[in-house]
Image: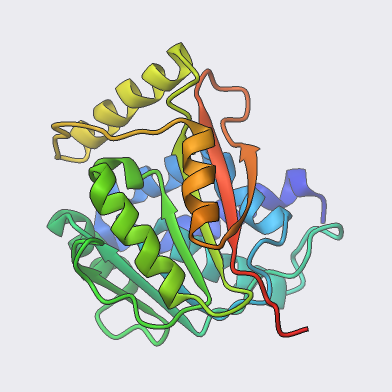
Amino acid sequence: MTEHRFLPALIDEASHPFRSGGHFAYHYARGKLSSDCIFRELLRRGLVTDRRRFLDLGCGQGSLFAWLLAANRLYAAGNWPADWPAPPRPESLRGYELMDRDVARAARAFGEDHPVVAIRQGDMCDVDFGEVDVVTILDALHYIDHQRQNDVLRRIRAALPAGGIFLTRVGDAGAGLPYHLCNWLDHAVTFVRGHRLPALYGRRLSDWVDLLRQLDFTVDSVPMSEGKPFANVMLTCRVPDRTG
């Protein structure tokens, strides 16, 4: 199957669980999964192919988890692009979200007793991360101040084993107008979801990378706006495996 034919099928499959969450939940998931390139690139690049235990902080209604589960189902059915690596086969998908409305939408989409997915209300600054193979924070770190960012990143590093991955997307505060456009859109989307952002706490890309390297991550950065006039950057942060 070609990527061009495959992606609509994956979007349909991943959006379907949110029909039970109501009109907004379904169309929000479908819009996000179809328009945001980071979901496609996570799979196409095979960034988390061999990982089993996932933690998504600021997970919203669980769109990333629906995407990963849908990818696994399509792959098992033989519907997969020939030039893409195999998707992950998650054994645990844990998420924490601050906003009750999003947690309620997730509960309606996945059910209260899903065998893999568990999304709970909680603040990433307070919850126990446990032990995981992958931690994701997509477009949410800038909601907390710099001191709490430092603490969250330190605890993420402690939760990951050798070879573990922290995947995040941040805005480059040194990018000028594209960065300010990102922030404007962030405020607008968050307002539509029923929330309000009093302040955002960005950093220059070089400062993000320096901070993560000080925590003993190796860091790869890739622009992740795909033609949009934004300053989004995906950071793939790996814990070095020095056993060899």
Residue 225 relative to residue 112: left or right: right
Taking the spot 71% from the left edge, 62% from the top edge, the residue there is 46
Position above or below: 211 against 228: below
Position above or below: 183 against 130: above
Q: Position of residue 5 (x, y in %)?
A: 74, 47
Taking the spot 13% from the left edge, 32% from the top edge, the residue there is 198
Taking the spot 39% from the left edge, 43% from the top edge, the residue there is 139
| Quadrant of the frame with the N terminus | bottom right
Q: Position of residue 60 (x, y in %)?
A: 30, 55
Q: Inspect this view and state whether residue 76 appears.
A: yes
Residue 97 relative to residue 231: left or right: left
Residue 22 relative to residue 171: left or right: left
Q: Position of residue 194 (x, y in %)?
A: 14, 40
| Quadrant of the frame with the C terminus | bottom right
Position above or below: 39 against 126: above
Taking the spot 55% from the left edge, 37% from the top edge, the residue there is 233
Q: Position of residue 153 (x, y in %)?
A: 39, 59
Total numbered labels: 0
Position above or below: 32 against 25: above
